[in-house]
Amino acid sequence: MTEATPAVEIRHLVKDFKTSFKRQPLRAVDDVSIRIMPGEVYGLIGPNGSGKSTTMKALLGLVAPTSGECSIFGKDSLKVDSRNEVGFLPENPYFYKHLSGEETLKFYGKLCGIKGAKLRDRVKELLELVDLEGASHRRIGGYSKGMLQRIGLAQALIQEPQLVILDEPTAGVDPVGSREIRDLIFKLRERGITVFLCSHLLEQVQEVCDHVGIIFRGKMVKEGRLEDLIAIEDQTELVMKDASPELVAEIEALIAKDGTAEHVRTGKPRTTLERLFLRETRSREETN
Amino acid sequence: MLSHASRIGVIARHAFTQLVRMKVFYFLAFFAVILIGSNFFDLPQHEGPESAGINILRSIKSWSLGAMTLFSVVLSIVATALLLPKDVEDRTLYTILAKPVPRIDYLAGKLIGVLLLVFVSLALMDVLMTGILHLRTEMVLADQMAVAEARNWPAQDVALLKSDILAQGPTASLQGAVFSVFLRATIIASMAMLISTFSSSTLFTTIISFLIYFVGHFQADARAAYFTHEAGTGDGFWLRGVALLISLVLPDFQLFNVIDAVIEGQVLPLLILGKLTLIGLFYFVFYVIASWLVFARKEF
């Protein structure tokens, strides 16, 4: 059986940048290899300046690798035709302020060779998908940060690409906007679209990605399936609802009797601050 | 697949819309004021009464073509210098180059968008100038014919006077001169595009482009004076090579001085206009290819 062509294949990517004052070039990416199969949602995480964006730019041909190779669905990413199947949302994008949301999507659509009724239908569909039908005729200059990210995501999807690359898709967006963008990523996953995103917001990556790579100072330090990476193999979690203190005490006594098992902690599971925020703001929105 | 021409067309139309929405056409109001003002700019009359009014016609042409030159040069440099760095700064360029858009298409599209704007601006100014000049020529002609009739001038002299006055009006040569203004703007915009591909700021591109524009008015004289003098020292071959290289990279804007002759009422030969068109095309292609060579290697 032949293996499917990877959506993304980065092989031993090295990227050095010339520096003005130092003779030694700055190595932004150091021997990074990534393989993303079609339909996967891959998260590249790492602190600021760790080489995430440079890796993405190399994949898009915006920077040329010092050594190594990048390909998209088997096509060399330095070649223009490799971009037929890619949609890209850069970090903190600013689109042409003089265009409306609808005009923006039409512009990108025309660049990809879509026109006429097909373009109109696609623009309408995407405006619905990103929930911007109401603001489609407003100039981009008046859009909020969250709206900009959503129109950015829509332009990335205009030619129905099979791979979407998102660089810090929720940077600077409020929790509600952030949740909306995450929901959109879920929708992409449901449609079988490969997503390659980079972020330093770990909780967000954990929620949407099934594969993760950790990059630090330009080197890939850990990579694999998320479930495999975050599971603590020697621990078991038991979550109970309405358990009486007596029952908890009984369970603890049983553990103590076992001799091999060790009781690590007992307590109430906590929600996240984000979930609390969303619950509170949504419940107030509904009552108003 | 989308052809290069269609993609360039999309980018050019977008660049044109972008500049139009920056309200650049407001300058047409200034042009109208200049044009109306030039109607009242009557120079002291030294010739006989048979030349009365002709100075006004020259003044209208001179001010109009001067304003067209100024606006087209400023627009070509500033608009070109602005578009590229702005796209890089706003990261809009990333989203465009992440689509299947070759870099040459992007550059050519932006440049053609600017040239489209310059062309439309010049066309609008030309319509205004031609309209005013036509009306004014009719007035001057009527006055002069009345004078000639009162003095019982021979028919031959009247015909000569008439053709002299009409030569100062809206002639085909005048349209050729406006087209020459556009050709010069094409060269300047293409040159500004090349500079903006390696410059890091709009200000740098603007200053250097203006400098090259001014140098372009003197480079032919400088070449002639320096290289013909030095060529006698034995390094003639190399010096001629350097002179050729300079003339290749830096356009000789003195060639466009034919516009002044048209203001004086002279005919602009088609051969000269054809030569200017070829020079304009040569520099457009030369600078676009040079810009592409720089831009293709540029990292963002």
Image (cartoon, coloured by chain):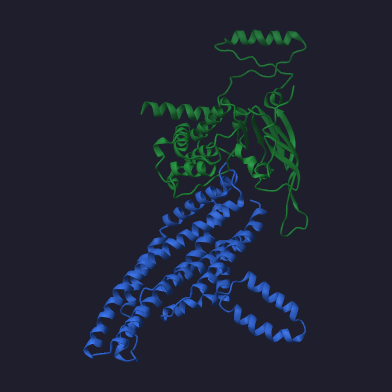
Instruction: Find residue A67 and report its horizontal and vertical position in percent.
Output: 77, 46
Q: The chain coloured blue carries which letter?
A: B
Nearest to the observer: residue A64 or residue A233: A64
- Whether residue A30 is visible to the viewer of this picture, yes or no, is no
**Above or below — where is B153 with respect to A268?**
below
**Quick check: A150 left or right of A34?**
left
Split into 4 quadrants, where in the image is the C terminus of chain A? top left
Chain seen in green: A
- Vertical side of B154 occupied by A225: above or below: above
Which residue occupies the foreground of this view, B108 or A145? B108
User: As rendered, which of A222 and B254 lies closer to the eye?
Assistant: B254
Give the percent coordinates (x, y) of residue A13.
74, 42
Give residue A14's position: percent from left, percent from top: 75, 45
* Picture coordinates of residue A33, whole percent (x, y): 74, 37
Give the residue displayed 29% in from the left and 73% down from the top. Answer: B135
Which residue is farthest front? Answer: B155
Quarter-of-image position of residue A226:
top right
- From this viewpoint, which residue is outermost toward the left? B150
